[in-house]
Image (tube, rainbow, N blue to C red):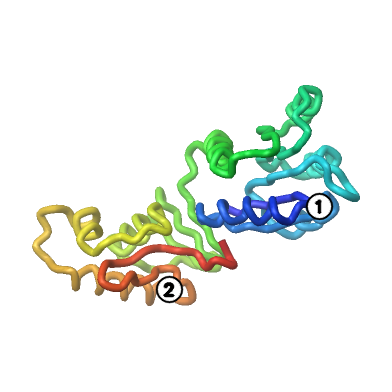
Amino acid sequence: MKVLIADDEERIREVIKEYCCNEGYQVLEARNGLEVLDILATENIDFLILDIMMPQLDGFSTYKELKKKQNIPTLILSARGEECDKLLGFNLGVDDYLTKPFSPKELIARIKAITKRKHPHSNIFSFQDLVVDFQGYTVTIKEKKVKVTLKEFEILTYLIKNQNIAISREQLLSQIWGYDFFGDDRTVDTHIKMLRNNLGSYRDLIITVRGMGYKFELPKEEK
């Protein structure tokens, strides 16, 4: 998921970005409303975190402009907690309103809740040109279908859904092959090797955790 953080305070953007990256989100930043509109003109944004008090173009004006062309899930983040501001935001159509100072963990929880409401049946993972359709059992890169075996797909799905968590070979064996499987750890390593080959330039998203197993992790600068 690609998140745009719009706030003129760099420190606040840094904190939000850190927590968003930990969730595997891709993050873009804007310092004012005009930058927001410029980014939206060229990027497909899945979620917008929007401060009200920004230079050049304030949050409410920015939201009015973007609503003319797009309908992006939006959370207003502001030091202004007056009821009239909250009512104005909700009347404009924003999905949530969080007052500063705020808990980053609460912010992430609200993002997840809004996303779940907006996309209750979302079964797609996407990162740059890589798209994994969990329900359709397909992997595509640059809109071209990648040939993977069922076991490779199940491994990839399990790693993605447990993103940033180190998964042991034993855990993969029990989850993918079942408890009654009589193979050994080399089975996992062989399938990971084939999966990486099939993923091509995205092979490095599957990281080897020495002495344990594997994990799926997005590059820090690209999360």
Q: How many marks?
A: 2
Query: In this orientation, which residue lies closer to the viewer: 139 or 52?
Result: 52
Q: Which label belongs to residue 53? A: none
- Secondary structure of the residue carrying tag 1 is helix
What residue is shown with label 1?
37
CA gap, disc 1 and disc 2: 34 Å
What residue is shown with label 2?
203
Query: Could you tell me which residue is drawn at 12 percent across and 59 percent down?
Result: 181
Query: In this orientation, which residue lies closer to the viewer: 98 or 222?
Result: 98
The answer to which image quadrant residue 49 occupies is top right
- Secondary structure of the residue carrying tag 2 is helix
x, y percent for residue 74: 68, 40
- The answer to whether residue 120 is above or below residue 205 is above
Say which amino acid is labelled 1. Leu
Which class describes the residues within 10 Å of circle 1: few (<14), some (14-19), or many (20+)? Answer: some
- The answer to whether residue 196 is above or below residue 4 is below
Which class describes the residues within 10 Å of circle 2: few (<14), some (14-19), or many (20+)? Answer: some
